[in-house]
Every structure is written in structure tokens, then in C-alpha cells.
Image (cartoon, grey):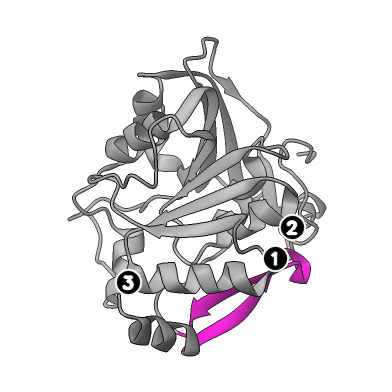
Amino acid sequence: MSETDEASATTAAERTQLLGGRVICLQPHAGFRAAIDPVLMAAAVPAAAGDMVLDVGTGTGAAALCLAARVAGAAVVGLEVQAPLVALAQAGAEANGWTGRVRFVEGDILAPSVDIPAGGFDHVMANPPYLQAGRSRPSPDPAKAMATVEGRAKLADWVSFAIGRVRDGGSINFIHRWDRLDELIAALTQLAGGIEILPLLPKADAAPKRVIVRGHKGAVGATVRKPPLILHEADGAYTVAAEGVLRDGQSLLECPP
């Protein structure tokens, strides 16, 4: 991507705020836009100061930036295949004053970059495309279609890449559709264990639509299903627990159900 194209992408972007204004995220005015999923995923990563975190499929960097805001001293690398989104994510890091601590790399998980070394990270998080090709109608916007519908890389490829990039004992964190949980667990248990499942419920009386799954490379232990996080009250407002994560930057490791 040329410097002219990068400048054009960032000039056309909208400055949005996450975590109650603690994070600036640049997003396209139309097409691909981050929702709450990357914010929730970042809140689930058990990172600490000094850790190195990889965000796979970072998009405009929402998860990477939110994790950097929550965990001062953690270094974050975002990997994204779409060059215009990489430019926006990097501009977001600069807008927050995190140049150096948070950086973004253009690359494909099926052709790994030397900038993303095997076993080089304490934690990996990923918000991969949710939809299987041929089973849904993709968005007419190419960037949004790439972000939401699987291409050559399938879910098992995303899991394999994540496990390969994390150190032994490090955590692998995914947010995905509830109806693909079994597929995600099957891929993770090839090389990871101690798996925790956190269902995300739209409302208390609703079935889960999303799920956060965390495992640890090389670990052993039973798979545990944690109490669900309920996102909305009956009137549509966020629950206190959801507000704590989405606005106050609270960790899901500390958040009450």
C-alpha cells in the first residue's frame, strides 16, 4: 500500500471512542466497522504488564487498542490482511500515544510473516470471520465481506496459527458464534487444554449468540463452562456487568456474571 493510499484511508476515517472515551479507534465511515465483540474479547485475555500479545485479524485495531488501554505495559501486535485497515489501526495507535508499544502488521495467516514469530507471544487473541463461505450472503462491501465470511483460511487454520504463535503455557483466546463452538473446541483441543467457555447472552432469557473460548497451549485439564455474561437488560440497556467491561475497561476475569 502506497503512502498516498494510506493517507487517503486515514483521511476518510471516522474517529470513534471505545471504553468510555479511553481509546480512540479510527474506522471507515461505511463498510467494515468494529462492534462490541473485539472489546469483549480483549477483556478476556489474562495479560499482565510486560507480556506480548498478538491480535490476529485485528481489523482497525479495536481489540489491540482496548487491551493496551486495560493493561499498561503490555505490548500488542495486530495482524491484518487488508492494508487499508492496517493503516487505520496504526493511525489509531498513534492517536492514543502508543506508537512502539502497539503496532500493526499486514499479513496472511496462511503465509506467516517473519514479523510474527512462532512461539513469540504470551497470549494470542482472534476474532475471525464468523460465517462459512457458501452458507450466507456476503456483504456487498468487499472489506466487510472479508471480515465476516471465511475465505481460504478456515476456522481450523485460525486456531492452528494462534497455537503456533503462542509460547508453551500461553493463552489462546477466541470470540466466535455459539453455533460453531463444537468446531472451535475440537480444533483447540489438538494442542491446548484447560479450556474455559464463556457464553455471551443478548438478554437473560435468550440463547447465546456469541461465545468466548480460552485455552492454554500444552495444558491439561477439563473443559469448564463459566456462568454466562448477560449483555442487555429487558429494556435493551447494557447490564451493569457489560457496562463494566465495555465502558470502564474491566477485565472479564474479574467481572461478575
Taking depth in this image into account, of 20 and 69 the one nearest to the observer is 69
Q: Residue at x 42, y 67 (%)?
A: 86
Quadrant in which residue 106 is drawn: bottom left
CA distance separating discs 2 and 3:
32 Å
Q: Tell me the quadrant of the picture where the N terminus can be found.
A: bottom left
Q: Badge 1: how crowded within 10 Å, few (<14), some, or many (20+)?
A: few
**Which residue is at 75% across, 71% downward?**
21
Judge left or right: residue 124 versus residue 15. left
Q: Nearer the viewer, residue 17 or 198?
A: 17
Viewer-nearest of labels 2 and 3? 3
User: Does 64 appear in magenta?
Assistant: no
Segment colored magenta: 12-29
Drawn side of residue 111 relative to residue 199, left or right: left
- In the visual, does 120 lie left or right of 198? left
The vertical placement of 97 against 119, above or below, is below
Residue 143: mark:
3
Q: Which mark is residue 233?
A: 2
User: Residue 240 in the image: x percent, y percent?
Assistant: 82, 54
Which residue, given by chain and number where applicable, does mark 1 sit on?
236
Label 3 is placed on what type of residue?
Answer: Ala
Judge from the rendering whether residue 249 lies leftward or rightward of residue 104; answer left or right. Answer: right
| Residues at marks 2 and 3 touching, judged by CB atoms closer than 8 Å | no
Q: Earlier in the sequence, mark 2 or mark 3?
A: 3
Q: Residue 98 is drawn in which quadrant?
A: bottom right
* Disc 3/disc 1 C-alpha distance (Å): 29 Å
Q: Above or below — where is 251 with respect to 171?
A: below
Mark 2, other Cα within 10 Å: few <14 / some 14–19 / many ≥20: some
**Residue 214, visible in the rendered structure:** yes
Disc 1 residue type (three-letter):
Gly
- Give the prevailing secondary structure in the magenta stretch: strand
Residue 21 within the segment the image draws in magenta: yes
What is the secondary structure assignment of the residue under circle 3? Answer: helix
